[in-house]
Image (spheres, helix red, strand yellow):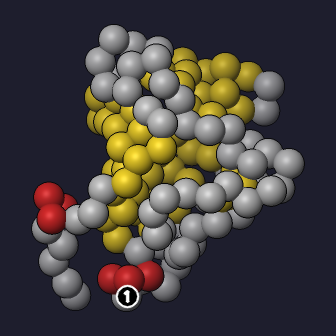
Amino acid sequence: MSIVHNAELPRAAIPGIDHVTLACEQNGLRSLSVWQQRIAPGQASPPHRHDCEEVVIVQSGRGELHIEGRIERFGANTTLIVPPNVPHQIFNVGDEPMDLIAVLSVTPVRVELPDGQPLPLPWVS
């Protein structure tokens, strides 16, 4: 068991997204990663997929999940469930930052573009 002081964790960013890895293999986990992200108004995650299940808990803001040719709208206090290898993209369509917690069923997390090419990210998952 360990206690992580989230405010002390390193932050990384890709355009429009502030990212913190809350827990991963570096904390002794073998099959789980937990990320915290803030997506700025009008911004979006890159279109991507993971070879694992993903659960995204939306704490604040409102957005759209683009997945399998559909656009699903959501707001705060919503959970998004993304199956393995399904390309998806999360858009912040509101005027406020969108705060998310993402739980992924693998560590480290490999992120790919929809065509399977690796998507380099500035953090260690």
Q: Residue furthest right?
A: 115
Residue at 58% of width from left, 67% of height from top? 109
**Which amino acid type is shown beneath numbered disc 1?**
Gly
Left or right side of 9 for 84: right
Residue at 29% of width from left, 18% of height from top? 96
Above or below, 45 relative to 54:
above
Location of residue 54 by image quarter: bottom right
Judge whether 87 appears above or below 84 on screen. above
The image shows a total of numbered marks equal to 1
Residue drawn at x 48%, y 59% as measured from the top left: 122
Left/right of residue 88 with respect to residue 108 in the rendered view: right
Tell me residue 14's x, y (percent).
48, 44
**In which image quadrant can residue 99 be found?**
top left
Is 12 or 110 nearer to us in this picture?
12
Quick check: 62 left or right of 44?
left
Q: Residues within 10 Å of mark 1 (few under 14, many from 20)?
A: few
Task: Provide residue 110's location: percent of width, then percent of height.
Answer: 64, 66
Q: Nearer the viewer, residue 87 or 122?
A: 122
**Residue lying at 33% horizontally and 11% vertically, measured from the top left:** 95
The image position of residue 67, as x and y in percent, is 71, 32
Name the residue carrying label 1. Answer: 28
Q: For numbered disc 1, what is the local secondary structure?
A: loop
In the displayed orientation, state which residue is furthest to the top: 95
Q: Is residue 113 left or right of residue 91?
A: right
From where the camera sits, is residue 74 visible?
no
Does residue 11 sit above or below 69 in this rendering? below
Is residue 27 visible in this depiction of the protein? Answer: yes
Q: Quadrant of the N terminus?
A: bottom left
- Across and down, in percent, residue 53 comes to 62, 59
